[in-house]
């Protein structure tokens, strides 16, 4: 199975899991397309909260890099949409989610998450709880 196929499979799996948790979800992969703009792989919304997820998968290794141009593009998308940007990082069988501002920037302007940072990220259920904690609750919702 090619890396692109593995990435697409992971994205579809994430979309399905998010839908099962009540999110409206769009998979918007840009790699391999002729898109000029950069968009995150997954856009998910729940009760007005928007999360944007750039997925990266590695069979092994200790770092995940995102090139400067791609990172700046998806950060701009996040700014325009009002969404919160995450890196979804799968190394071996572990899937973790990091807020994009947790990534380190290299001297060349690329973004990197080392294995320790990735391991400290949120798992899927923690990501869902994080989003649900941001949903505004009015007094009416308690009556």
Image: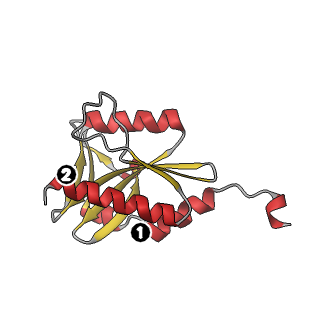
Can you tell which quarter of the image residue 36 is in? top left
Please state, as top left, top right, bottom left or bottom right, where the C terminus lies in the image. Answer: bottom right
Q: Nearer the viewer, residue 33 or 100?
A: 33
Q: Mark 2 or mark 1, which is nearer to you?
A: 2
Q: Position of residue 5 (x, y in %)?
A: 20, 55
Q: Dot 1: few (<14), some (14–19), or many (≥20) neighbours within 10 Å? A: some
With respect to residue 87, does 115 lie above or below?
below
Instruction: Give 102 or 81, whichever is nearer the viewer.
Output: 81
Residue 77 placement: quadrant: top left
Q: Residue furthest right?
A: 143
Which badge, 2 or 1, comes first in the chain's sequence? Answer: 2
Q: Is residue 110 left or right of residue 24?
A: left
Q: Residue at x 79, y 56 (%)?
A: 138
Which label sits on residue 72?
none
Image marks 2 and 1: residues in contact by CB distance under 8 Å: no
- Residue 68: percent from left, percent from top: 26, 36
Quarter holding the N terminus is bottom left
User: Which residue occupies the extreme top position in the image?
Assistant: 36
Residue drawn at (53%, 66%) of the image: 21
Q: In the displayed orientation, state which residue is furthest to the left.
A: 1
Question: Mark 2 — residue?
Answer: 4
Q: Which residue is mark 1?
A: 123
**Circle 2 — which element?**
helix
Work out how far the residue at label 2 is from the one at label 1, CA to CA, in angstroms. Answer: 23 Å
Helix or strand or loop: what does disc 1 sit on? loop
Where residue 106 sits: x, y (%)? Answer: 24, 42
Task: Report the side of 31 relative to 48 (left or right).
Answer: left
Nearest to the observer: residue 106 or residue 136: 136
Assess disc 2: are there few (<14), some (14-19) or many (≥20) residues with their C-alpha within 10 Å of its C-alpha. few
């Amino acid at each position: 199975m090619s890396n692109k196929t593995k990435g697409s499979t992971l994205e579809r799996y994430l979309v399905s899991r998010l839908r099962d948790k009540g999110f409206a979800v769009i998979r918007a992969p840009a790699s391999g397309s002729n898109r000029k703009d950069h968009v995150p792989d997954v856009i998910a919304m729940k009760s007005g909260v928007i999360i944007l997820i750039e997925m990266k998968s590695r069979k092994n290794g200790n770092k995940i890099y995102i090139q400067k141009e791609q990172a700046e593009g998806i950060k701009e998308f996040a700014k325009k949409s009002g969404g919160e940007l995450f890196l979804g990082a799968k190394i071996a069988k572990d899937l973790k989610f990091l807020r994009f501002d947790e990534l380190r920037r290299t001297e060349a302007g690329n973004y990197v998450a080392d294995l320790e940072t990735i391991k400290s990220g949120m798992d899927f259920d923690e990501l869902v709880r994080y989003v649900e904690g941001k949903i505004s609750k009015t007094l009416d919702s308690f009556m």
